[in-house]
Amino acid sequence: MPNLSDVLSLFDELYPPTRAESWDAVGLVCGDPDAEVRRVLFAVDPVQQVADEAVAWGADLLVTHHPLYLRGTTTVAATGFKGRVVHTLIKNDVGLLVAHTNADSADPGVSDALAEAVGLRVTGPLIADPTDPAGRRGTGRIGELPEPEPLSAFAARVAAGLPATAQGVRVAGDPDQPVRRVAVCGGSGDSFFAEVRASGVDAYVTADLRHHPASEARETSGLALVDAAHWATEWPWLRGAERELLAAAEKRGWSLETRVSHQVTDPWTLHAPMPTLEGEAAAGVATAPGGTAPGAAAPEARST
């Protein structure tokens, strides 16, 4: 059975902290390097409900994509929600490890998992990492569908491939325009429109698209935009990270049990449809799913 320090060394190989952006905060947040690790829980957000899940399951390590303290802090007092998360984890001997932008640019990384989830064959990065001689690492990914399909069908494909959220999937473009080559970027991606246009893709799948960048992108070209919830575009990476950990653990002879959290921690919880442009009344109010992601009734534990 590995110690936490052993697992940290492995994650440093998979997602080197040196490849994180300079503004990022990745690595170990809390935990005893000498503590044994038997169970590892993966989640997107280090929020209280996820910390409680880790404790209830008996996890020794919680791995999240988003940092708990992105901008630093001077206190971990339980008077705030972040401090309460830290106290919950430490009291129950659960370590917290963050892999954020170092996981975004990894090979495979967050955008590879997003591309896989929506049925794309990855052909390369959207923005290549110049330090990678193989040309596979970098920000975002370019991928291809097996056959061209209308934007409306592709949007439905994205909606079916990602975990359900209150937002759903927003689309900008002609529903009938053909889509074959697609750029994807897990998380917020509207700062990469110049690179997306230069890539010559038919559509761009990302999250957190703002009005002005999206409007300008549409006016500049015929690029179709598919905007999903931030949490939903990054959730597929959890499965990929789990596979990477289990494969490496098997080679090392480690006995590990892993689990991916299916709790929907996207902050938006309600979607109220408005009357259509034709004046038809909306059918009702659609709410976020009751806390489970991609159709799984209960998360399965996996082990080597």
Image: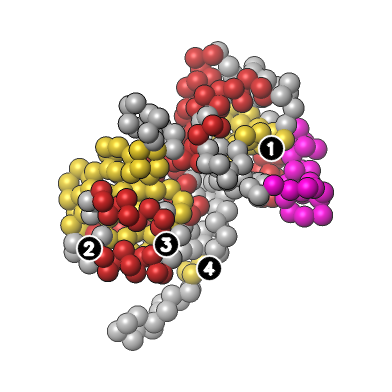
Please report the bounds of the magenta region as a residue range. Answer: 72-94
Nearest the viewer among 184 and 87 is 184
Q: Earlier in the sequence, mark 1 or mark 3?
A: 1
Q: Position of residue 125 (x, y in %)?
A: 33, 39
Look at mark 1 in the image and give the residue it sits on.
29
Q: Circle 2: is it few (<14), some (14-19), or many (20+) Cα within 10 Å?
A: some
* Label at residue 222: 2
Q: Secondary structure at mark 4?
A: strand
Nearest the viewer among 282 and 70 is 70
Amino acid type of the residue that numbered disc 3 sits on in the rendered structure = Leu
Q: Residue at x 77, y 55 (%)?
A: 80
Q: Residue at x 70, y 40 (%)?
A: 56
Answer above or below: position of 159 versus 262: below
Residues under labels 4 and 2: Cα distance? 31 Å
Q: Residue at x 67, y 24 (%)?
A: 4
Q: Position of residue 201 (x, y in %)?
A: 24, 51
Q: Secondary structure at mark 2?
A: loop
* Label at residue 209: 3
Q: Secondary structure at mark 3?
A: loop
Look at mark 4 in the image and give the residue it sits on.
270
Amino acid type of the residue that numbered disc 4 sits on in the rendered structure = Leu
